[in-house]
């Protein structure tokens, strides 16, 4: 007798990274057949991300794009996903996060009365315009899901405040922590020998990422100005900046950092390389939501190059600080951490508020309960303060 299929829909690199540990956990448990579906939003990037976990898409949808608009992408993905669900009739569909793929997958499943599992549910910035359109996407999926897998207690509280039934909300942790810990532990060699020298040398490594569309243009110029100022001020730092693949953005980065010593600009990095860099970093300057979630696992504080963030747990835990794109503020806050190691270390002393490396196992178990394959939910991820208190008391939470 064949096992019920659970379709895991990934359209972007972060989705693939966060769904990969779930697919592995489902295969290990043997209660369902996980089917990794590349939605067609960024199929090449999904395939490359899965390769880091020795996985590949089981299904890749062929989405025709002419205008490149969000309505076109949404329409084409829903048509393709609807046909797939009609043919294979999955028992459940897992969507992750807040992309166009997330919303398309949830809507296509909902229309066919297939239970929707929302992984990384409950994130809220409180502003529909920022990030756009992600804040709206995740709120809309929150109306369609049968199971909301919140990464943290705060995310779960957001859902409960929106009148989502408590029986449908479960705190699983964030699977990106599972992913980054597993991949970084392998310490795979870099393809770029400059990066090998960067992690092997005696300099303090500062990782900088500025990929969000709202960071392009004048905000990126200010970020690059801050990088130049920091390199001049601190002769013992080495900066690595993986650039966005957009040619105009790359040209802007190259022009802004031309001739600046101790700055390495790279193409977009494979996930194992980025995880390994992060594990060696002294400090990270980033507008990435994923890096905000991953950095605390390696004891690396993050200065967030955004005006608002839905990852507010980082701010509450003290492991991240919002600095926006004001060059002077970036330099001032980075300098405080570069000048005071004790202050820097204190930012991440409480651990990672997003996960403990077991989120994918909890996710598999929660889905099994949803499908009637088990009757007992796993123990939720404990809140960060419980873990901290337990560590302080010398016991395991």
Image (cartoon, rainbow, N blue to C red):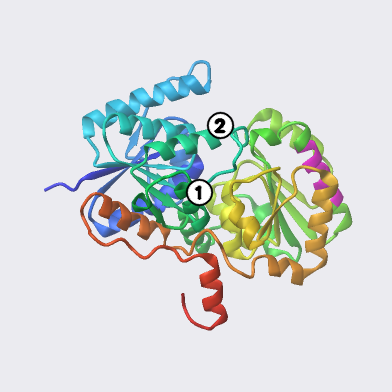
Q: Which residue is mark 2?
A: 133
Look at the image and tell me whether residue 80 can be seen: yes
Closest to the observer, 253 or 357: 357
Name the residue rendered at 22%, 34% in the picture.
Answer: 88
Disc 2/disc 1 C-alpha distance (Å): 19 Å
Residue indicated by mark 1: 158
- Magenta residue check for 226: yes
Callouts 2 and 1 close, C-beta under 8 Å: no
Percent x, y of residue 20: 40, 50
Magenta region's main secondary structure? helix
Q: Name above or below for residue 184 compared with residue 323.
A: below
Q: Is residue 219 magenta?
A: no
Give percent across and percent down for residue 162.
47, 43
* Label 1, residues with CA under 10 Å away: few <14, some 14-19, many ≥20: some
The residue stretch that appears in magenta? 220-229
Tell me the element at label 1: helix
- Mark 2 is surrounded, within 10 Å at the Cα level, by few (under 14), some (14 to 19) or many (20 or more) other residues, namely some
Q: How many marks can you see?
A: 2
Residue 161 picture location, percent across and down: 48, 47
From the image, state whether disc 2 or disc 1 is nearer to you.
1
Q: Nearer the viewer, residue 220 or 380?
A: 380
Residue 370 in the image: state x and y as whole percent: 27, 50
Q: Please identify the quarter of the rendering in which residue 251 is found.
A: top right
For the residue labelled by badge 2, is the local secondary structure a helix, a strand or a loop? loop
Identity of the residue furthest to the bottom in this view: 394
Look at 15% across and 46% down and name the residue there. Answer: 2
293 left or right of 90?
right
Residue shown at 64% from the left, 37% from the top: 212
Which mark is drawn over residue 83? Answer: none
């Amino acid at each position: 007798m064949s096992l019920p299929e659970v379709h895991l829909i990934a359209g972007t690199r972060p989705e693939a990274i966060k769904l990969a540990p779930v697919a592995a956990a489902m295969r290990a448990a043997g209660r369902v057949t996980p089917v990794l579906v590349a939605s067609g939003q960024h199929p090449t990037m999904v395939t490359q991300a899965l390769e880091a976990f020795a996985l590949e898409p089981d299904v890749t949808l062929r989405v025709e794009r002419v205008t490149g608009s969000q309505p076109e992408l949404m329409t084409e993905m829903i048509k393709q996903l609807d046909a797939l669900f009609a043919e294979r009739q999955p028992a459940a569909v897992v969507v992750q996060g807040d992309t166009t793929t997330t919303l398309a997958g949830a809507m296509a499943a909902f229309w066919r009365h297939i239970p929707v599992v929302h992984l990384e549910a409950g994130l809220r910035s409180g502003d529909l315009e920022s990030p756009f359109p992600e804040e709206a996407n995740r709120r809309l999926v929150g109306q369609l899901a049968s199971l909301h897998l919140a990464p943290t207690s705060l995310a779960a509280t957001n859902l409960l405040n929106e009148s989502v039934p408590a029986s449908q909300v479960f705190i699983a942790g964030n699977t990106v922590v599972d992913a980054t810990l597993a991949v970084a532990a392998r310490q795979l060699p870099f393809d770029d020998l400059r990066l090998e020298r960067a992690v092997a040398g005696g300099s303090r490594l500062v990782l900088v990422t500025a990929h969000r569309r709202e960071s392009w243009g004048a905000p990126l110029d200010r970020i690059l100005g801050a990088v130049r100022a920091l390199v001049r001020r601190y002769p013992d730092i080495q900066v690595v900046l993986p650039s966005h693949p957009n040619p105009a953005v790359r040209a802007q980065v190259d022009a802004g950092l031309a001739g600046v010593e101790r700055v390495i600009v790279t193409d977009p990095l494979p996930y194992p390389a980025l995880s390994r860099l992060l594990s060696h970093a002294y400090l990270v300057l980033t507008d990435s939501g994923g890096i905000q979630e991953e950095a605390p696992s390696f004891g690396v504080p993050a200065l967030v190059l955004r005006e608002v963030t839905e990852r507010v747990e980082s701010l509450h835990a003290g492991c991240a600080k919002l600095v926006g794109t004001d060059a002077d503020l970036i330099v001032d806050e980075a300098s405080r951490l570069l000048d005071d190691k004790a202050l820097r270390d204190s930012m991440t002393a409480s651990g990672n508020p997003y996960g403990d490396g077991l989120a994918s196992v909890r996710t598999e178990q929660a889905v099994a309960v949803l499908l009637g394959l088990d009757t007992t939910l796993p123990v939720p991820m404990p809140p960060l303060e419980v873990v901290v208190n337990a560590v302080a008391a010398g016991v395991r939470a």
